[in-house]
Image (spheres, rainbow, N blue to C red):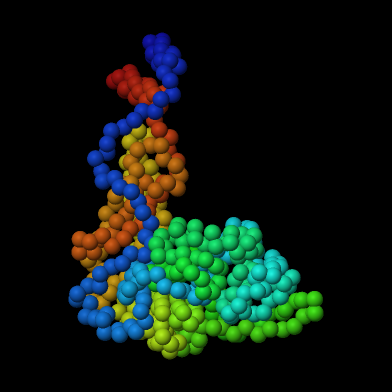
Amino acid sequence: MKKLVAIGIALVCMISLFPEYPVYGTDTGQNVGQSTSEKGKEVEIPSDSGQNTDALNIESPSALLMELNSGQVLYEKDADTARRPASVTKIMTMLLAFEAMDAGTLSLTDTITVSEHAAGMGGSQVYLEPGETQTMEDMLKCMIVSSANDAAVAIGEAIAGSEEGFVAKMNERATELGMQHTHFENACGLEAAGHLMSARDIAILSRELLTKHPEVMDYTTIWMDTIIHRTKRGESEFGLANTNKFLKKYEGANGLKTGYTSAAGFSMSATATRNGMTMIAVVMGSKTKDIRYSDAAKLLDYGFANCRIYTDDKVLDGQNRIPIVGGVENEVTVKAKNDFHYVLIGNADSAAITKEMVIVKGEAPIQKGEVVARMEYSQDGTVIGGVDLIAAASMEPQKYHHTLHKLFLRYINVYDTYERN
């Protein structure tokens, strides 16, 4: 026993002589790649789907159909041409408004004071006056239901201090979302040189708003409402009527935003939900209001008639640990960031979908919540999407004192076994 104690003391002394350098491992030999989030991925419609999308006869110059959960593009026509969006612009103003409320910088009950600049907006408006006050919630109703330009600018000023500052935030957010054919010049969509969006960008923006802030539909589905104007002259009631008449024209319609100017034509991001599936149909530059609604209906009809949602809510299937090199432990527990959703078109068979785990980061240190792997899904050999797998806990890199401690414990176990035998 004295010999064992002496060896232990010697090991402790050795530990004190070593600096705290990490022990680096070797290549795991596994497939390591950069994980990316799915932002709406175009897929080729299978030749055996039995459907000809050309037969949809979309008249509008630009159009795109996207399924909400997966972000999968099901139809597109000239979807990357930048066009005047008119009041569809306000989808970005909505997104930034809900994000500001999430961040705690604004709330639905906060009071917004109307500036002369906001009150001076032309076009669609609710005739707010300089110095008038409205709650954030009533401002949202004015902007979303009645497409009020004055309310949109007042919200932007409340968020950023000025419309110019708010427009900078709009463009910054567009870049973050990968909206490559978008540039904003104002908060409401009034005609301005260089104020442009593409159909694909509108779909990406619509999806971000609906997936992160589904409560927006509490406002987009309002058919009629009222606000109270509060000015120096007293109070008066003002009626709001939804500019999106598609709500009454299409079964399941629940949003999202229409737009029109003489230069832009008629545009909209139309959303509808049936049987638990939500579609986003974007049309831009329609010659008439009827063409706009007709094209949106054709797109949505196609989506609901020919698509089924494949959902995997057991992404890991028990494979909740992956190997880690150079860590204090040999494995780290992971969890799926979300379920996997995919749109099956026509006669496509879900049995043809397979999945495989791909290691993104296989070496310590690991931070809790960091993406360390990805479950990739394939259909007939083609990757169709994936789900990020994140670390359930942090893991420190292994250092020399950890190694010596393990050696010491191993020695004790061996010695104990030898003594017993």
Quadrant location of the C terminus in the rendered image: top left
Residue 264 can be seen in this image: yes
Residue beneath the point at 33% across and 46% down: 360
Frontmost residue, 55 versus 104: 55
Q: Is residue 374 above or below residue 88?
A: above
Residue 194 position within the rendered picture, expressed as x and y whole percent measured from the top left: 46, 67
The extreme right residue here reads: 233
Residue 329 position within the rendered picture, expressed as x and y whole percent measured from the top left: 38, 36
The extreme front residue here reads: 193
Residue 213 can be seen in this image: no
Residue beneath the point at 60% across and 64% down: 163
Rendered image quadrant of residue 352: bottom left
Q: Is residue 177 above or below residue 302?
A: above
Q: Is residue 180 above or below residue 27?
A: below
Frontmost residue, 307 versus 177: 177
Residue 135 position within the rendered picture, expressed as x and y whole percent measured from the top left: 69, 70
Frontmost residue, 13 versus 3: 13
Residue beneath the point at 20% across and 61% down: 381
Residue beneath the point at 26% across and 60% down: 383
Counting every numbered tag in the picture gives 0
Quadrant location of the N terminus in the rendered image: top left
Rendered image quadrant of residue 47: bottom left
> Going by the image, does 48 lie left or right of 43?
left
> Going by the image, does 9 lie left or right of 376?
right
Residue 401 position within the rendered picture, expressed as x and y whole percent measured from the top left: 41, 23
Q: Is residue 44 above or below residue 303?
A: above
